[in-house]
Amino acid sequence: MPQLRIALAQVNPTVGDLASNTDLMLDWARKAAEAGAHVTVFPEMSLTGYPVEDLALRKAFAQASRAQVDTLAGLLAEAGCGDMLTYVGYLDADEVGPRNAAAALHGGQVVATQFKHHLPNYGVFDERRNFKPGNTLDVVRLHGLDIGMVICEDLWQDGGPVTALGEAGVDLIVSPNASPYERSKDDVRLPLVARRAKEAGAPIVYTNLVGGQDDLVFDGDSIVVGANGDLLARAPQFVEHLLVLDLDLPSGGHSAEGEFADLRVTRRVLGTEPLAAYEPLAAPTISEPLSDEAEVWSALVLGLRDYVRKNGFHSVIFGFSGGIDSAVTAALAVDALGPDAVHGVAMPSEYSSEHSRSDAAELARRLGCHFRVEPVAGMVRVYVDQLSLAGTGLAEENIQARVRGMLLMALSNLEGHLVLATGNKTELAVGYSTIYGDAVGGFAPIKDVFKTHVWDLARWRNAEADKRGETPPIPENSISKPPSAELRPGQLDTDSLPDYALLDDILDDYVEGDRGYADLLAAGFDAEVIDRVVRMVDKAEYKRRQYPPGTKITFKAFGRDRRLPITNAWRETHSR
């Protein structure tokens, strides 16, 4: 039975950096060639990074991307990788428009080019805005084996390119992907790939992107599935990795071309002679999926690390309040960047409790990061006195948060740190934050994490430290004490909000599930609480639009996933 050694290059490119991405792919291609790979598959748009958004509409960028593919083909040959068939994702453009494309490189040349057929236009995807669809499938024969290709969304469509390749006949399907992470994504991804492999009657090599790009993070988790749907190999999540394995592929001697499932199948022959029999590698690795909390933590760490580094920053700064949100953000930042790159600032006012001050200092001690105390009472008093804000309630409270925001931005300008916003999804949903105050910053690491989940992550991270014999990074008091903004005497979050467990249940249904008032009432929630929560969510859209980006981990994150007008008189309440 013919053999073929396949390498899946799970890499982390940077959007727009064609030169560095080329070097990255050359490096991993060399590793694949050294491992004896005959075919190497890089992720979708790995040369340009993904998503390129409206960069796809810039002719100069599309031209540079297309030219770089030819350059890469030549460089691979010069590096001794020319005999290896290498699949590379990139941006192309023709007389029809921009294309989400993948090229097969061999012998220093581009031997096949295919354009993505199904362009997703839901959730975080806007590909119909940026690309034109393709209608051909280019099958390449290498060592007597026919290799077809589908690009990401093409794999997800019933009756689409996989069906066409199955009808035309192929021995192997490679699938470059840029599939963003969200919780439990693999519960859907692996069964889908297994189903498609059985439909096509051929193994599928699924190579996924890894790394952070603005508010998206890609988890890797590349897989190979046999023609019978069995999982043959899996790469680890959230790290660059080269997965190499040998496949025994029964050659079908396929030759059919023409129209299949409304797609035109063409064939290119590179070699008809099967490889001489060789000793296969040991059984490939099947990496175990991470637990839910480990998966989420890894996603948040990678998303933060890549946002900081890919945007040219070397350090971050934010407020250490002694509360749970800043504590979890700090632990994430240290895991992502190291303690020397994290600068915490305690900014006590006259309402700050002694435990908040001590918890902030203890957090910094445990993490080993930079820490300073910058009292704000004097600065706040200037505003309060000049504007006669004493006793005005919200105006006086919010000036404290805004002074803290100005202080952090001043230190950012002075020392070059990126300011992090520490708000969570629950607060963002109901508008429980001060715009231009605690909402300042360039990135919001826990923006898509509900408050109750923040507590879960804190307990998990501390438990992991215990297992490793390390000091738990988050002070127990920051986890156990009632949360408070401490903007007035004796203030607690529950003064303004329902209990967080109840609130998050309602928000999960209303935001994530798009359930209306009647649905929430039928689910057993109290009518007055529903009305109160829904009104808060609907009125806070203007705040969310001005909030920094943050890593998406849920099915429906604020931003690309959920797009509502700011000016909007509709209110979903019992009175409608």
Image (tube, grey):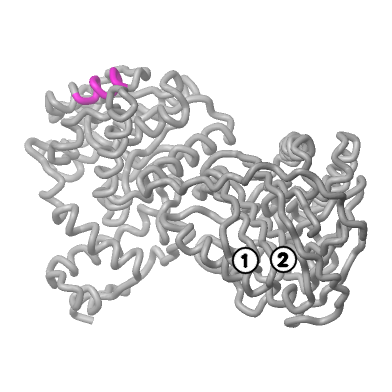
* 19 vs 413: above or below: below
Residue 395 falls left or right of residue 542: left
> Is 341 inside the magenta-drawn segment?
no
The residue positioned 21% from the left and 36% from the top of the image is 387
**Which residue is at a point 32% across and 74% down the rendered structure image?**
570
Q: Percent from the top left, x then y, of residue 112?
A: 86, 60
Q: Is residue 360 magenta?
A: yes
- Give the SS element for disc 2: loop
Which label belongs to residue 116?
A: 2
Residue for point 28% across, 52% down: 426
Q: Which residue is drawn at 38% across and 22% down?
A: 343
Provide residue 58's location: percent of width, then percent of height.
74, 54
Of residues 179 and 30, which is closer to you in this image? 30
Q: First in sequence: mark 1 or mark 2? A: 2
Give the quadrant of residue 351: top left
Residue topped by disc 1: 153
